[in-house]
Structure formats: C-alpha cells, structure tokens
Image (spheres, helix red, strand yellow):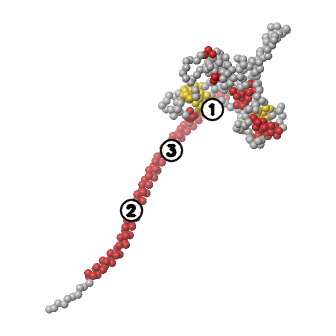
Amino acid sequence: MECTGIGTASVLEDDLALSEDDVSPDPVPAVNHWPALPHSEPLQHAEQPYATPAPTLPVHGSPFASFRSSPSLPAFALRDTYVKLSFPGDQSTTFKLRRLSEITKAFNLQRDAAEVKMASVKSRFVYISRQRLDILERVKAGEFLSLPLVPHDSLERPRKFPQFILTRYPVDVDHRLAERYPGVYSARRFIQDGSPIDRIVVVWNLPDPPPSTIAFEFLPLLPPCEVRRLHDDRPWCFRCWGIDHISRYCSVSPKCAWCAAAHDSRKCPASSSTSEPSPPPDTSRWKCPRCLQPGDNVWHGCARRRVPPRDSTPATPLPPAPATLPPQDLALRKSITSLQARCAALEERFASMDAKLASLVAAQAATDARLSNLVETQQAVVSSVSQVAERMGALTSRFDKLCELLPCFDQSSACTSSTTRSPSPKRRVRH
C-alpha cells in the first residue's frame, strides 16, 4: 500500500485534483519550492565559452513561481486502473491509518505494487486496483472496523456544467424558485458586504446555452433577468491567491490580495473600507499577487483573471460541404428526414392527446360540480323528509291521545240516551 504524506505544493495540488476529478485537466508541472543555492563564482565552461546556460526552475516566492511551464507528471490513479472510494463522514487520521494497516495485514500488500493507496493522510479518498476484486468486495461490505467504504466508481470524467449570472433578480424573492426554469440545475444568491444583492448564479445543465434574457412566470410584472456567462468559475486559493487549487492544499506563504505583501488581506492598510463612505482608495500601494502589476489587486484589474477559461477554443469555420455526397451520407440524410417527419407526427399526436386530456379534465370538473349539486339537493331532501317525519310523529301522538279519549265519551253518551228514551208512567185520567 502506498500512502504519501504532506510534501511539496505539487503533491498537494495533485491531491486536490485527484480527490475531486481523479485526473487533472491540465498538465501539472513539478515546481521547485527550494531557493537556489548561492554560488561564490559563476560556473564557466572552457569548451563552450559562449554556451547559453540551462533554464532554471522558478524560485519559491518569485513572480513566475505560479506559472506552469514544465512537463506534465503522470496521473496518481487512472480511472481505468483504480476504483475510487471514500470514508463516510469526517474520520480522523488515526482511524484512517488503522483501517489501512488492517487491510495491508489482511491481504499482505506490498508497497511497490501500489494496489491500495491514498494521496495524503488528510484525504478522505482511497484508490484500490480494479484487479483486486476480493479487496473491493470486503471493503464495501465493511469487514474492517465495521465501516464500509463508499464507492465513487465512474470510468467517465464528470462533466462540469457552466455557470451564468442573472441580474435584476429581486432580493426578497427566494433564489431556489429559479430552479423551476427548464435548464437550471441549481441557483445561489450573490452576497456582497454581508447582505444579498439582486444577482444570482445558476448552473445550466442543458447542451444549448441559455437565452440572453429569462422571464420567470412568478415575476410577471418585472422585466426579464439578463443572463451573462460566469467565466471566473475556477477555484481560488485564499492563501496565495492562485487559481485551480484551494488554500487547504496550499503550502505557499500567505500573501495579501491588495499589496502582495506577507500579511493578512483583512488587515491591509491599502484595502478600501466599505463600512462607511470614504474617498476613493489610494491605488498607489496596490499590487496584485497573481500578475504582480502595480495599481491592481485580485478583484480589480488582475490580468490573469481576465484570461478566458482553459477549455475555450477559438471558433473555427466549418469546412464547406462537398458538391456531391457519397451514397451513405444521402441514405443517412434520408433516414434523418424520415425520423424528423415521424417526430413531427408524434408531436402532433401528443398535442391531440393533450387536448383530449384537457377536455376530459374539463368534463371531469363539470361532473364534479354536478355531483356536488346533487349531493346538496340530496341533503336538502333528507332534511325536509326528516322534518316531515317529525311532524308525522307529533300527529301520531295526538291521534293516539284522541283514541284514548273516545271510549269514555261513548259510554257517557249511551247513558244519557237511555235515560231520555225510557217511557214515563201514564197517569190515569178520571172521567
């Protein structure tokens, strides 16, 4: 197993490139960080008195130390040779070394074979040879210290999406709403002097570039947002203010972003204060630590910052099409034309299906309204029936009471009728 410690800045730059992308997009040269030894007398060659001296490597701290002009170094771990895995969570250096020592003892690994290696002890990534499937399976299963490693295996290089700046985006509107626009993968707010401003940065994930202006549906009464490409999207080092690496893996002495001196940028007397209104700053003491131009700083006037990205190439005109095309190209064009016609027909069908679905949705909405009306009518009928039932119950109770009173009335009427109908005694009339 190969485990390299913290060494020169070139090793740390390799660690950064490999821990994020595994293969550096640009050749990373070997930079000498040791000053040249002083000689009492210059070397002279008797055979060639006028021979030109060999080019010397840049000295640490010199103006040209950050430029990369030496030949490229081999990659630390090729994608087709190694599998990239990572420790889950934030593990300590002692835990990582213990884990790697157990793997080395379990499989009797040799240092020269470099079957398992790390870029540095601070890195959370481990690279294992693709030929050692036994190590990969046991490491993924978590047989060592009961902690499985997370694989990040991909033979293809991850693609970095371009970033764009959107201006005139309201400050009081959530920047995450911009992710609803097709093509916007993510969005973040610009923060200036500790407070948000009316600009956001969006990551575009479509092959075609975005339009010059974007009008969001949730901002109907505001003008559309202007779209500009963010060219300076490469990582910065806030220690030496270099490009394409970060301060975590930088071993160069810190420099000031205002005057290029060896002190903190926040305590530089030449910096312009934004806390309170002040006269224009004195740029005579400014000096950019990147391009070493007087009167400039990292943020204003840096020549290296205005350089376009490395992947940008000048547009070359396409070669003119030949007058006569081969039969294969003609057949391909015919097939493409037919496919385009089929795609158009499918789009028309999809449009008709969308219209039918819209009509069905409208019919369903009308049906739902009718059903709601019927439910309301049914509820009214049920309430009226319940009222009628209550009244019928009251009438029934009254009728029962009347029926109870009727027999007594019949008996009293019968007695009175018998008394009235009985014949009275006849009186004798004397003649």
Which quarter of the image is occupied by the C terminus? Answer: bottom left
Q: Is residue 352 above or below residue 230?
A: below
Q: Position of residue 421 (x, y in %)?
A: 26, 82
Q: Amino acid at mark 1?
A: Ser
User: Which quadrant of the structure image shows residue 275?
Assistant: top right
Q: Secondary structure at mark 3?
A: helix
Pinpoint residue 346: horizontal percent, then vertical percent: 57, 37
Q: Are marks 3 and 1 in contact (CB under 8 Å)?
A: no
Q: Residue at x 74, y 18 (%)?
A: 58
Residue 114 sits in which quadrant? top right
| Residue type indicated by callout 2 | Arg
Q: Nearer the viewer, mark 3 or mark 2?
A: 2
Which residue extends farthest right? 47
Left or right of 31: which side holds 160?
left
- x and y, in percent, of residue 391 in the image: 38, 62
> Where does label 3 land, which residue?
360
| Closer to the eye: label 2 or 1 | 2
N-term mark: 3 or 1:
1
Real-space CA distance between mark 3 and mark 2, rounded to the nearest whole angstrom: 46 Å
Q: Residue at x 72, y 19 (%)?
A: 61
Amino acid type indicated by mark 3: Leu
Q: Which residue is mark 1?
A: 335
Q: Which residue is mark 2?
A: 391
Quarter of the image with the N terminus is top right
Considering depth in this image, is 343 or 338 the residue closer to the camera? 343
